[in-house]
């Protein structure tokens, strides 16, 4: 069965970086884009960007350009999201999600369990 | 940027009664291929979001048929024919037409009266 399993919770100081992993299984990793979405306290879901595991190509939401890096390791079917220059308002739960592709209208059919990132001095 | 606006933001519902959530896009989500690139997700308390509806009206695998999606262009609706206690959570619409950019609505919190 399809699974996306994320790394554990992180506590970081302002200005630091955090790198979250998303290990996938149960499907061909290179065939489906992986998106990252976050949920901050009291806010709604916010789309951050995607990575094409086949090519490594990426695209980011305007709000995160210059601060987010998305990579992948095809040998272990894992996607990564690194957020740099952390601010207090980056405190959130970060999710990875699989994109169904064109036939699924680019909807997100499987999600990771979420990784809580806390930015605190 | 495509702005997604949901209403209402809070929706108290009696079990067994119907519920309806509206999602309006600032740009048309109707593609030339006839598909509307609009999805609905539900985030239950303490869980990851789950896909309910994609392409405006197609139920995702395993989603009960009391959930239905409709609409085209800029106006979309998610309907629950008879709300059950397990339906509580926050409902989000999301547009995927402006790919490679995606965006969510603000969310609608459904609670049981």
Image (cartoon, coloured by chain):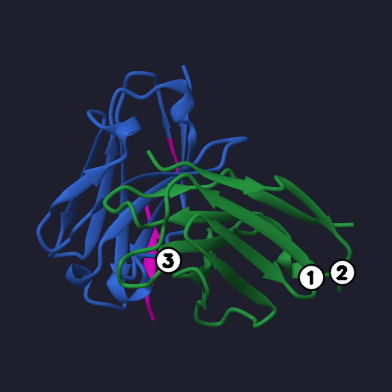
Chain colours: A blue, B green
Residues indicated by labels 3 and 1 sit on the same polypeptide chain: yes
In the image: residue B35, left or right of residue B57: left
- The image quarter in which residue A44 lies: top right
Tell me the element at label 2: loop
Q: Is residue B45 above or below residue A90?
A: below
Residue occupying image coordinates x 31% and y 33%: A62
**Outermost residue, left side:** A55
What is the chain identity of the residue bearing mark 3? B
The earlier-in-sequence mark between 2 and 1 is: 2
- Which contiguous range is marked in magenta? A1-10
Rendered position, B3 above or below B108: above
Q: Which residue is mark 2?
A: B15
Please state the chain letter of the residue tagged with numbered disc 1 in the rendered image: B
Residue A22 on the magenta segment = no
Q: Which mark is residue B36?
A: 3
Residue at figure coordinates x 50%, y 81% from the top left: B61
């Amino acid at each position: 069965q399809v699974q996306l399993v994320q790394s554990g919770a992180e506590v970081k100081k302002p200005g630091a970086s955090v790198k979250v992993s998303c290990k996938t299984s149960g499907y061909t990793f290179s065939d489906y884009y992986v998106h990252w979405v976050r949920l901050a306290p009291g806010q709604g879901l916010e789309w951050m960007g995607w990575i094409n595991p086949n090519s490594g190509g990426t695209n980011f939401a305007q709000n995160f350009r210059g601060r987010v890096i998305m990579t992948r390791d095809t040998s272990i079917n894992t996607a990564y999201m690194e957020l740099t220059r952390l601010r207090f308002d980056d405190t959130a739960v970060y999710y990875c999600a699989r994109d169904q592709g064109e036939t699924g209208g680019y909807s997100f059919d499987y999600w990771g369990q979420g990784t809580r990132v806390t930015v605190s001095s | 940027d495509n702005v997604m606006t949901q209403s209402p933001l809070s929706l108290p519902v009696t079990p067994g009664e119907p519920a309806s959530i509206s999602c309006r896009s600032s740009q048309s989500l109707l593609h030339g291929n006839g598909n509307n690139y609009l999805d609905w997700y539900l985030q239950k308390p303490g869980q990851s979001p789950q896909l309910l509806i994609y392409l405006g009206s197609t139920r995702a695998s395993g989603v009960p048929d009391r959930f239905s999606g409709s609409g085209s262009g800029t106006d979309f609706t998610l309907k629950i024919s008879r709300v059950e206690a397990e339906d509580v959570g926050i409902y989000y619409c999301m547009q995927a037409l402006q790919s490679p950019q995606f965006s969510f609505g603000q969310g609608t919190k459904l609670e049981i009266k």
